[in-house]
Image: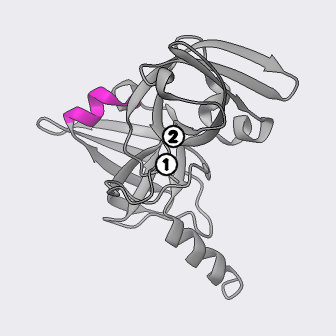
Amino acid sequence: MFTGIIETMGKVSRLEKDRGNLHITIQSDIARELKVDQSLAHNGVCLTVVAVDADQYTVTAIDETLQRSNLGALEVGSLVNLERAMVLGARLDGHLVQGHVDQMGRCTRVEEADGSWVFHFEYEGGPGRVTIEKGSITVDGVSLTVVDSGPGTFSVAIIPYTYEHTRFGQYQAGSPVNLEFDMIGKYVGRLLKGYVS
């Protein structure tokens, strides 16, 4: 379980394909604090640490993860949003995030807003895949509040700190992002699926 508060960014230093799997080695300032079997969110995707070597560590993504998320498009040098699993009893600064990406979305527009930015996204809607104004959404692992919401679209406002310390500073129209919808909304959508045709 995560909170969607990004700790740091890491840089991909090596990619190794192994049949349907991809071994991803990342250089990060938190690598020395990690241990094998620890869960870590990468652009919002929960992956298990399989090796640690000084300031680098390795995780493995299976084919389904690569198809459902933007991790399949990583290249050596790519930056990745990182968050370690939350500590039970600690403050929940974002919202409850599982690290299970629901789908990829796409940035459609970036607007400067007098010292901050508004990012617009589109996605494929469906039961449990909805956003609501002032509700929660996770974009590449970042816990955010929805500003505006429409069918298959939403926008979020980004402050300078988030812009500079996450991948938001790299997004432009067309950038693919990982989306995890609000957990409560997903359960409600699943329950209503049997009643709505």
> Left or right of 4: which side holds 105?
right
Three-letter code for the amino acid on which mark 1 is drawn: Glu
> What's the residue at 84%, 21% (across, down)?
18
Q: Position of residue 10 (x, y in %)?
A: 47, 22
Which residue is at the front of the view, 40 or 78?
A: 40
Colour mode? Answer: one colour
Which residue is under mark 1? 122
Quarter of the figure with residue 47: top right
- What stretch of residues is rendered in magenta? 160-167
Query: What type is the residue that disc 2 sits on?
Result: Arg
Tell me whether circle 1 and circle 2 mark residues in contact (CB < 8 Å): yes
Q: Residue 106 carries which label?
A: 2
Give the SS element for disc 1.
Answer: strand
- Residue 161 percent location from the top left of the image: 22, 33
Compared to 126, does 39 lie above or below? above
Q: How far apart are marks 1 and 2 (CA)?
A: 5 Å
* Residue for point 36% across, 65% down: 135
